[in-house]
Image: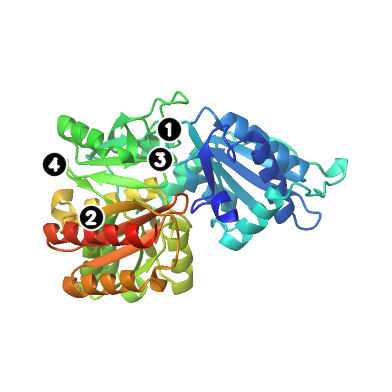
Amino acid sequence: MMERFFGTDGLRGKVNVAPMTVDVALCLGLAVGVRFRRGTHPHKVVIGKDTRLSGYMFESALTSGLCAAGMHVIMTGPLPTPAISFLTRSIRADLGVVISASHNPFSDNGIKFFDAEGYKLPDQIENEIAEMVLNKDMAWPYPDACRVGRATKIEDAGGRYIVYTKSCFPPHLTLAGLRIVVDCANGASYKVAPLALEELGAEVFRLGTEPNGININERCGSLFPEIVAAKVREVRADIGLALDGDADRLIVVDERGTILDGDQLMALCAQSMMAHGELPGNLLVATVMSNIALEVFMREHGGSLLRVNVGDRYVVEAMRRENAMFGGEQSGHLIFRRYSTTGDGLLAALQILRILREKEKPLSELAGLLQLFPQKLVNVRVEKRLPFEDIPAIGKTVSGVEAALAGRGRVLLRYSGTESVCRIMVEGEDVDKVSMYAEELAELVARELR
């Protein structure tokens, strides 16, 4: 039950449909307030959101719960998810809260949390919070009336975040002379991303910067990079940047209109960091979804790739454990641990622009590092969710396919976290064989797990 309550990136779902309702948000505010309240000192919570219409009601509900629990709430208004992580650390708050459903349509919303160090909460703490929220007999330990929290707003939150992101760009470099298309998905970065780029000297062409509460991610942003690609070609820009609704992920387009995903961006950044001695142990952390071409690239350049479960917080957890300084996801989450504790699309864009400026070469010449292997994804409805290793026929078939791929391909089977679905992925150099193996595995899984 708790696994369904909190997903890989907090709570998320349809607005006004359980669990994304204001009564649940109120209980969440109470629960995290109780969990993070320690002693009698004033406790502070930073709350940010994206541009969804429903953000107002969830902001009010969470604020009510947090204040009732004795926490002082500081609201920022619409700001990128990584900005809330930064501000939580900067103003020494006890907790950060983001109201956003990231790349989902406006009819969805979500709630996620950061601890005092700016890191997303681990599963154990989320489970403790979920237990309180789901307990219908929970006796909330309300503080005395004199210790109820206050709610205030930071008027210059966006400016603080812009200063922070610009400080991560080398002070001896500017973006003068660069023509940049930026698509903010009508989301949380609609003000700060273009301004940061312009203040560094770029000529900026804006897309997705007119939010109206319901157009977030609507045929714009990182889910539709072809829109940026078309604009790049139209205005002859040097680069295109596509952010998602909460601006924690980035997809890039080169000057020719070629779309670069997270794996290709990780290869470019990892190569630069290895050349500068900034990647300890030449270790890159990515998820099980990254293309095997990235793994081959790191191996051939004297490095290694550590794979973790899907979700940028699992990437960050592994980075902290292994003292790795860079990691990310194929979807465009890029984490530069020297500067940030979470994925940050604008910060990532500035690191790529730094490489572009240092090399003084077109992005098309710099970023063509990976020849992505063909990949086949198949979703299979299942009635049972048994461990794959407990089904001999599946284990034997997977081993046979991987042996046939001979280290130049791989098989991944995993269950969806929200649906009765088994996700099958096969990668390899031969597209026909990849499709054949994927369909073979799909038929087997359907037969064994019905």
Q: Is residue 196 left or right of residue 430?
A: right
* Label 1 secondary element: loop
Q: Which mark is residue 103?
A: 3
Question: How far across and down, in percent of the image, does residue 102 sit?
Answer: 44, 41
Neighbour class for label 4 at 10 Å: few (<14), some, many (≥20)?
some
Q: Earlier in the sequence, mark 4 or mark 1?
A: 1
Rendered position, 394 above or below 331: below
Q: Earlier in the sequence, mark 3 or mark 2?
A: 3
Label 1: which residue? 191
Q: Identify the residue shown where x is 23% and y is 51%.
A: 357
* Label 3 secondary element: loop
Instruction: Quote the CA–CA distance across marks 4 and 3.
Output: 25 Å
The quarter of the picture where residue 402 lies is bottom left
Q: Earlier in the sequence, mark 1 or mark 3?
A: 3
Label 2: which residue? 376
Q: Is residue 384 left or right of residue 305?
A: right
Q: Identify the residue shown where x is 36% and y is 67%.
A: 307
The quarter of the picture where residue 289 lies is bottom left
Instruction: Quote the CA–CA distance across marks 1 and 3.
Output: 18 Å
